[in-house]
Image: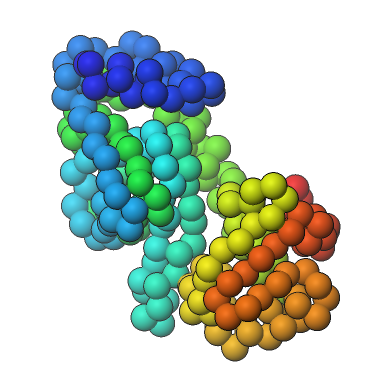
Amino acid sequence: MNKILSVLEQVEGEQKQFLADFFRNAPVWLLEACNVIELDKGEIFIREKDEVQFIYILTKGRVKASDFRILGIVYDFCRYEAIEFFGGMEVFIDCNEYMTTLSTITPCQFIVMHKEKFQEWMRSDANALWIHTKNMTKYLLGETRKERAYLFLQGIDRVYILFEHLYEQYAVDGRCAVRATRQQLSDETGLSVKTINRSLKQMMENELVAVRGSNITIKEAQYRRMKELTAEKIDS
């Protein structure tokens, strides 16, 4: 129980309120069964097709989902930030295997509980069930909307969206500087390296980004311009 309380003391704002609401009626046996773990950057904690054994609640850090089935290429197709659930969806649809591979992008903290404990809790706590179901439904609706729009995007538009996301996560004082190889950009967008090179060349010609080798720099004005270019195709 003290482990969960210590996590609540560390988080702030909406995240703190969300966790407090979620665990509001949690029984003592569940709180005592939960563990809090810390993982370093780059650690895989869930592998696709492995048996579902634990439910993870991300309380600190960032996580990425990867698909290894696309022409043998690792495709990082989604990123998550706290607070986020992993494994709960599989439990709700009676899937015995994890549906994707998940790894840490930054050092992360998780609340972890065993699948059976999670199931028993969900069946007895209407408040927690409602919050988890609402969170899961919002995620599914958002993913469906993004996937539908993404299907109609040209190659360069996908690069715009990736760079917008990078700017939003890493910009400091109106400037985002990151390192990424062409292959990494290919993995992130699902585009070929050839398309990445062509898109970067066009973006540099239009002064939308500065690229030197693997070093990519995006300024606030460039970020806003990319947002304008994608706004007509994907609702903000």
Residue 170 percent across, percent down from the top left: 58, 52
Residue 61 percent across, percent down from the top left: 42, 42
Task: Give the camera-side residue of 57 and 3.
Answer: 3
Query: Is residue 79 rendered to the left or right of residue 43?
Result: right
Q: Single out the residue that lies furthest toward the bottom.
A: 194
Residue 169 percent across, percent down from the top left: 58, 49
Give the number of marks: 0
Q: Is residue 133 above or below residue 93?
A: above
Q: Is residue 136 above or below residue 125?
A: below
Task: Give the camera-side residue of 30 and 4.
Answer: 4
Q: Residue at x 49, y 22 (%)?
A: 12
Residue 48 shows up from this direction: yes
Residue 19 percent across, percent down from the top left: 41, 22
The image quadrant that residue 165 belongs to is bottom right
Q: Residue at x 28, y 56 (%)?
A: 44
The image quadrant that residue 193 belongs to is bottom right
Query: Is residue 108 rendered to the left or right of residue 119?
Result: right
Residue 230 shows up from this direction: no
Query: Is residue 197 rendered to the left or right of residue 135?
Result: right
Q: Residue at x 55, y 76 (%)?
A: 214
